[in-house]
Amino acid sequence: MKIKTFPLFLVIIFLIIFVIFYKGLNNSNIYTPETNLKKNIPYFKVKTFDSEKLIESDEIFKNDKFYLINIWASWCVPCRDEHPFLVDLNKKKGLEIVGLNYKDNKKNAKIFLDDLGNPYDIILMDQDGTISIEWGAYGVPETFLIYNKKIIKKVIGPLDSKKVFEINELVK
Amino acid sequence: MASLIGLYSLFFGLCSSFLIIFFSIKNFRNFLNFDSKILSLTFLQFFFVVVSFLGLIISFINSDFSNETVYNHSHTTKPLFYKISGTWGNHEGSLLLWLLVLTLFLFLFLLKSKEQSKKYRILTLFFQQIIIIGFFIFLLKTSNPFSYIFPTPAEGLGLNPILQDPALAIHPPILYLGYVGSSIIFSSTLAAATLNKINKEWATHIKKWVLLSWVFLTLGILLGSIWAYYELGWGGFWFWDPVENVSLMPWLALTTLLHCLLVLEKRFLLTSWVVILSISTFTLSMCGTFLVRSGILNSVHTFANDPERGLFILIFLFSLIFLSLFIFFFFHKFENKNMNQLFWLSKETSILINNWFMMYFLTVVLIGTIYPIFLEVISSEKISVGPPFYHKLIIPFLIPFLFMMAIGPKLKWIKSDMLIKKRLIVLFLISFLLSFLLVIKLNKDILINSILLTFAFYLFFVSLRDFFIKKKLSLPQNFAHFGFSLLILSILFNNILSKEIITNLKVGEIYKSEKFEINFENIGQVEKKNFKEIIGKFIIKDSEDNIEILNPGLRIYNQPNIVTSEADIKVNLFEDKFMTMNYVPNQDYFNIRYQIKPFMIWIWFSVLLITFGGIMSVFKKRYEN
């Protein structure tokens, strides 16, 4: 009996794999910024950049307020390009910018901020990159707009004037 | 002209496939002896593919831009060497290379298997022809390397600059010999399973082919890794990138297969293992081709995103899987003997245990590679699986794996006695003490590091000692295992002792830390045929006042217009000094990355040792007496 059901089972498994691969083929694998939208933000506990104290995500994100979480690193070249936009966005009222410093060296990160200005209201340290994985980030830089603990916009890659405009529209 | 000949040659090659199949079926039924006509036809088919391949190379050399492949991937200003290597640096050309290797291996197999039975040879030929026809159709239908464009463009688009590199020019052919070489193992295993011929003699016969593919696959992976190390400028040699993973998976399956064949040869056990592993090795190779070529994963190897191509390989791949499942379940005779024949303390048990570990590693890599695709399809959620996943799941299990590798070869076939040798225990204690002291001195996490180091050192010492014992005759095994211990040790020390500085410097500026002083002395410019290079001069002084000059560069390629950063690496026996310089737009400083990577050269060397073990084994008449 065993010898008959087992092949059948295998065939079914492989058929399922086939279907999944087939569907995967039609998915675009490049940028799908919409997918993680409207989801609750992940819970995490993290050290802050300045005081190295542990802080919970619930303490950072409050309801009825817009937050922009920006994943960055001093070694990341596109981060430099988008930095002026962040500095601009920081001037906007009702929007707090949270920096998530990704796999970085603290000293270099400081030099980076000294050079280009610090637009962040708070900076969190993601030294092994696990928190960024929780957020579903592909790399640096990446930016998420959060309202009522939900991700309402996700930008993969550096911010530019068009994307900043879109963010501004949403925050209004 | 060359393109036209190449194209017709491909059609003739496909036609010869049908002739071969026709004659094989006739021969299979009617005659006692193998029909020599079939051998000639196989050679003819190989010859046609060679002509076609040469046709493509000539089109590349002549920069014949009426050929679409040449137009997309070449440029008149490219050096001749990269014009030639550009032939397989693209989707169409590399598939032609697949086909070339497929037909080459089939021809060699028929030449070398004259002492085998007629039915077995013909069936192998038949299965291999199915694969060959599949690839012919794939090539002609979806990725014709000889597409004609009119009017002829004056200039080509150029080859991706990061592919313009000597190591990468020979990496694909070598890797393909391994990848595609596994097709002949697949075909002959199916043939042997159909004829119920999986036995000790067959194991001896097929082992040579397994070793051959294994050697090329190992070398191919090594070359790719060396390339990634100096060209991608991250200073690492293995990133657990999906593309690296898809080459590692067939390697793991092939290595396991090799060890199973040893058991099969000696004890006539594990026949189902052998069949399943032969099938998986080739299907994993195909699956790798599917994953990187269909554009389902993004990487340097994704040449073009064309769902039609992906669909073709997918259907072809699953047809082969179902064909092999069918043969496995309906023709393969399962062992009547059960596992009771295995004594717990014997060589075959130790091999079996490590096979399970290898399967575990394979599963981890497989899941890490394809799980993101599955998740995205099912829940449209995107995740990325990175090194922490692999490290956490693989490293703990390396410990027993290394231990079995060390003591396995010491055990006897069938049944070993419990006589524990004093020397082995003494070596173990030495390894333990040595690792413990080292870890304390280096101030690292004591537990996991010292345990892992202990077992790596243990394998190292045990296999080192074996070189000096004459009665042991398995020199190839010893080389490979010794190389593996050296590999693990080098990787461990490389991980523990690496140092890195990332900073921004202007010309003339000096960066100071406790240990180094980096002086950005000046900057120069060099013009080459296909690129302009900006070269920085950096003087690095360490705390002992040793001076090292490093010259990383930035290359600005003319066609296509891409900037790449060229690492400068000073290699010596103990450590590599690695420096890259990156352009920062609109700033007058450069982003500098300086790394000290200990024992890099030993990583490459140990893989070469492992390969050397394989090569020795190919040329050795008898593995063990």
Image: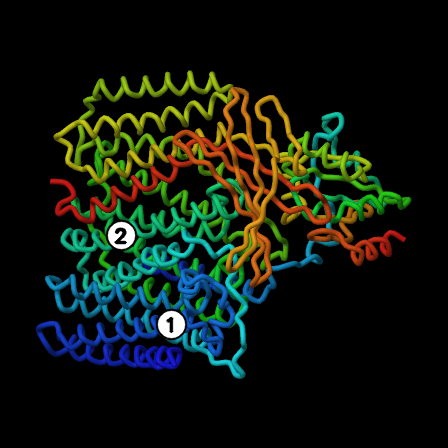
Farthest-out residue, bottom? B150
Is B334 positioned to the left or the right of B592 in the image? Answer: left
Nearest to N terminus: mark 2 or mark 1 = 1
Q: Is residue B157 visible?
A: yes
Residue shown at the point (37%, 16%) measured from the top left:
B433
Q: Is residue A52 or residue B316 the one in the foreground?
A: A52
Total tally of numbered discs in the picture = 2
Q: Position of residue B147 (x, y in %)?
A: 46, 78
Q: Provide the chain ID for the residue under circle 2.
A: B
Q: Secondary structure at mark 2?
A: helix
Tell if the residue under mark 2 belongs to the same chain as the one under mark 1: yes
Spatial CA distance of label 2 from label 1 is: 42 Å
Residue shown at the point (77%, 34%) measured from the top left:
A114
| Up/down of B19 relative to B264, above or below | below
Q: Is residue B337 visible?
A: no
Q: Amino acid at mark 2?
A: Val
Question: Mark 2 or mark 1, which is nearer to you?
Answer: 1
Q: Position of residue B5 (x, y in %)?
A: 35, 80
| Up/down of B46 relative to B148, above or below | above
Quarter of the rendering containing residue B340: top left
Q: Amino acid at mark 1?
A: Ile
Disc 1 crowd rating (10 Å Cα; few below 14, some 14-19, many 20+) is some
Circle 1 residue: B58
Q: Secondary structure at mark 1?
A: helix
Q: How is the image coloured?
A: rainbow
Disc 2 crowd rating (10 Å Cα; few below 14, some 14-19, many 20+) is many
Circle 2 residue: B274
Q: Position of residue B557 (x, y in %)?
A: 56, 58
Residue shown at the point (16%, 75%) measured from the top left:
B28
Q: Position of residue B196 (x, y in %)?
A: 19, 61
